[in-house]
Amino acid sequence: MSEKKLFGTNGIRGTVNVELTPEMAVTAGCAIGTFFGKKNLLIGYDARTSGPMFAKAVSSGLTATGCNVFLAGMAPTPALQFAVKNHKMDGGVIITASHNPPQYNGIKVIWSDGIEISHEQETEIENIYFQQKTQFADWKHLGAVHELAGINSEYIEAMKTHVDTTKIAEKHFHVVVDAANSVGGLAAPVLLRDLGCKITSLNANIDGTFPGRMPEPRPENLEELAKTVKALGADLGVAFDGDADRSIFVDETGQIHMGDKTFAVVLKQFLLENPNAQVVTPVSSSTLIKDTANAYKGEIVWTKVGSVTVSQKMKEINAKLGGEENGGVFYGPHQAVRDGAMTTALILGIMAKTGKKLSELVAEQPQYFIEKGKIECSEDKKPKVLEKLLEQVQGMNINTLDGVKIWFDDKSAILVRPSGTEPAYRMYAEAKTSERAVELVNEYTSRLKKILETI
């Protein structure tokens, strides 16, 4: 972490007891508490081994500044976000590193509406943190710590109000749930049983070392899920990331579908029911999303990459749907945040309403092949790399909202952007053939390597 930056794209992140220490978490808690000013804040965490440790450290900082802390315990991130709003808290802190490996953890700060605070508010907290402007409470006015039980049940009940539970139950869907040995197993399987589904669970036991698979639901981590869905003849498979705000789906044939394709399924149905609606999505999204919006009379609002940016834009323009290519769907009528379990319920609702299998719903769409790449790049070199890459692509059809996205005449495209969570550049390529998408990732990986050799 740089000297003057605490927050990345998605909260504070770092390796446990290396960049992110209990001492740092206490100090961050003090800064967050000072920012809120003697308010009521909820705290929860995912399944990581360091979760309880950091929750207690942040709680100490919050109570030291006079904030009252409500400990919700272990829960999916969207369940904690819903609880902040549902219990009329002033805000919340979630201890999670989402999709990062088990040695990482992080701190997300939530506003009273359940949405992560804006980057401007993050800067306010950073200023308090780095300039040591903590306002400690008098010893007589320290904050109190309370337990808050039952938030997962409240979250499950809320989701059921947004889908046709009767229609889904009539179908008796068989769903295989891969919970990544984390909090994805705490709400989604209960919700799906309540919706009349038969559940088969993978990696259901809570284990912060993530022994079943890494918490990033990438295709290479989901082979067991795909094989299980096919072998059992299940209707659907769903895999969650480490904090269960994202979901990647497997159709009944065992085919893994990346987030763009399932978001497009949700988008089509949403626009059929809400014509002319605005939909928020980052520049990393596939042209498929633009195609779907155009076909069903929706208006795309592009943003920089990052769930915070999508949520904040949805809040700003009062949009009811947002989505990311990584499996994040933001369903505004429930809450304008990524929510893996809510997305699962929406997909099942569409399958029940249309009578179509997921493979059929995806096959109806314009087909694009997505490939991703990544190359290591130290934080100090990131701006220079982008500057040199922009020089190379001048005159091409580009968008520089976040990194650089380049569109080509054959309907292929590539986004090259600096990661906000690690020392790396990420590439998202798409094309009408997988070969072309791979070719783009290879070409721009090579370009970045050559640029890095010169700086």
Image: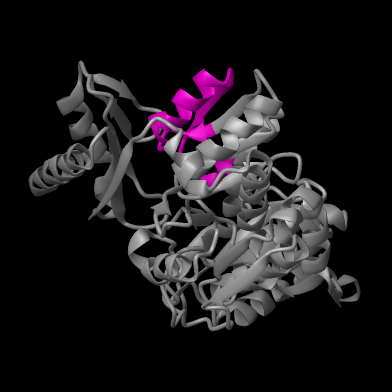
Residue 151: give x, y in percent of width and height. 80, 67
Q: Quadrant of residue 413?
A: top left
- The colour scheme applied to this rendered structure is one colour
Residue 365 x, y percent position in the rendering: 44, 32
Residue at the (44%, 83%) spot, across then down: 211
Q: Taking the image as drawn, is residue 243 in sight?
A: no
Q: Who is closer to the viewer here, 316 or 233?
A: 233
Looking at the picture, does residue 238 appear above or below residue 203?
above
Residue 122 shown left or right of residue 450 in the figure: right
Nearer to me, 163 or 43: 163
Q: Position of residue 439 (x, y in %)?
A: 15, 41
Residue 50 at least partly seen: yes
Q: In the image, is residue 61 above or below residue 79?
A: below
Magenta-colored span: 281-310
- From the viewer's perspective, tell me whether residue 297 is left or right of residue 111: left
In the rendered image, residue 360, in percent from the top left (x then y), is placed at 48, 42
Image quadrant in which the C terminus is located: top left
- Residue 297 magenta: yes
Q: Is residue 69 left or right of residue 273?
A: right
